[in-house]
Image: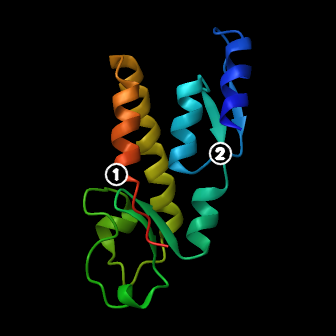
Amino acid sequence: MFETTDRVAMLLPADRPRYFMGIGDPEGILEVIEAGVDLFDSVLPTRTARSGAAITWQGRLNLRNARYARDPEPLEPACDCPACTGYSRAYLRLLSAHNLRFVLELTRGAREAIERGSFAAYKRDCLERLSTWDR
């Protein structure tokens, strides 16, 4: 899929937006951005939330796991979304808001890295941070 995206993106006009439908995992988002995709959409952040999982920089947290039942920690300490600033992991049911915020911050960082000319380093750092998922 990513090889095809690389090839097709090169054929599309550089002065026009390039759209990828249905990519929502952080790794996939970074791959298609690297290929030159400008726009994408996905139900993954909200679908993941409805199943009780949060996307964080520490990996995917399955909050249905018993170890989070009494966890007083915020979902993601550095996140400023309402779910992270107002609730603990034990109480949390605002996962959609957090997961959408995560994707917005991931893409904001990608945009800034592209503007600095350092997208490859940004992608590498993100993928390293995301390499451990709590399944």
Q: Residue at x 34, y 61 (%)?
A: 58
Q: Is residue 80 visible?
A: yes
Camera-side residue of 14 and 35: 35
Numbered marks: total: 2
Q: Which residue is mark 2?
A: 23
Using the image, determine if residue 75 lies above or below residue 44: below
Camera-side residue of 22 and 80: 22
Q: Is residue 12 visible?
A: no
Residue 109's mark? none
Q: Residue 49 occupies which quadrant of the picture?
A: bottom right
* Amino acid type, callout 1: Arg
Give SS at disc 1.
helix
* Amino acid type, callout 2: Ile
Circle 1/circle 2 CB separation < 8 Å: no
Q: Residue 20 occupies which quadrant of the picture?
A: top right
Neighbour class for label 2 at 10 Å: few (<14), some, many (≥20)? some
- Structural distance between the alpha carbons of marks 1 and 2: 19 Å
Give SS at disc 2.
loop
Q: Residue at x 58, y 43 (%)?
A: 28
**Color encoding of the figure:** rainbow
Camera-side residue of 121 and 82: 121
Q: Residue at x 34, y 69 (%)?
A: 75
State the image coordinates of residue 133 (x, y, percent, origin top left).
Answer: 44, 65
Residue 129's mark? 1
